[in-house]
């Protein structure tokens, strides 16, 4: 599926006309901002590589979900303590 076909499929999957109007408005605003800033956009190849990497991460997230009781804040604190020791304490 080409990028253009994927965009059409995404538009077709929107639930109602208001969603389509919102999507079109966002594209118009994006084009105005991009035109004013003169940004050069990445090539389709680099975008597709980034998209592939993102989709791969999403697949991994579904395949190996975090446990319900996963406390990321506690994990972060322990890692900071291990790495920085007493320097990290307030």
Image (cartoon, rainbow, N blue to C red):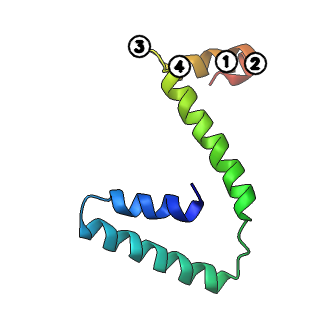
Whichever of callouts 1 and 3 sits on the residue coming sooner in the sequence is: 3
CA neighbours of label 1 inside 10 A, class few (<14), some (14 to 19), many (20+): few
Q: Are marks 3 and 4 in contact (CB under 8 Å)?
A: no
Whichever of callouts 3 and 4 sits on the residue coming sooner in the sequence is: 4
Q: Return the mark for residue 7.
A: none
Q: In whole angstroms, how far apart are the C-alphas of marks 4 and 1?
A: 21 Å
Q: Residue at x 62, y 78 (%)?
A: 34
Q: In whole angstroms, how far apart are the C-alphas of marks 3 and 4?
A: 14 Å
Disc 1 vs disc 3: which is toward the camera?
3
Q: Residue at x 70, y 76 (%)?
A: 39
Reading the image, the residue beneath label 3 is 69
Disc 3 vs disc 4: which is toward the camera?
4
Residue 67 is situated, as x and y percent measured from the top left of the image, at 45, 14
Q: Is residue 83 left or right of residue 23?
A: right
Residue 53 is situated, as x and y percent measured from the top left of the image, at 66, 41
Element assignment for label 4 = loop
Reading the image, the residue beneath label 4 is 64
Element assignment for label 1 = helix
Whichever of callouts 2 and 3 sits on the residue coming sooner in the sequence is: 3
CA neighbours of label 4 inside 10 A, class few (<14), some (14 to 19), many (20+): few
Q: In whole angstroms, how far apart are the C-alphas of marks 2 and 3?
A: 24 Å
Reading the image, the residue beneath label 1 is 79
Q: Return the mark for residue 83.
A: 2
Q: Are marks 1 and 2 in contact (CB under 8 Å)?
A: yes
Disc 2 vs disc 4: which is toward the camera?
4
Whichever of callouts 4 and 1 sits on the residue coming sooner in the sequence is: 4
Q: Classify 10 as above or below 66.
A: below
């Amino acid at each position: 599926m080409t990028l253009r076909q994927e965009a059409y499929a995404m538009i077709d999957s929107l639930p109602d006309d208001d969603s389509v109007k919102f999507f079109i408005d966002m594209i118009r605003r994006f084009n105005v901002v991009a035109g004013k800033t003169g940004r050069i956009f990445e090539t389709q190849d680099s975008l597709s590589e980034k998209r592939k990497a993102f989709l791969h991460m999403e697949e991994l997230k579904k395949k190996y979900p975090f446990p319900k009781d996963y406390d990321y804040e506690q994990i972060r604190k322990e890692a900071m303590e291990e790495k920085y020791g007493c320097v990290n304490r307030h």
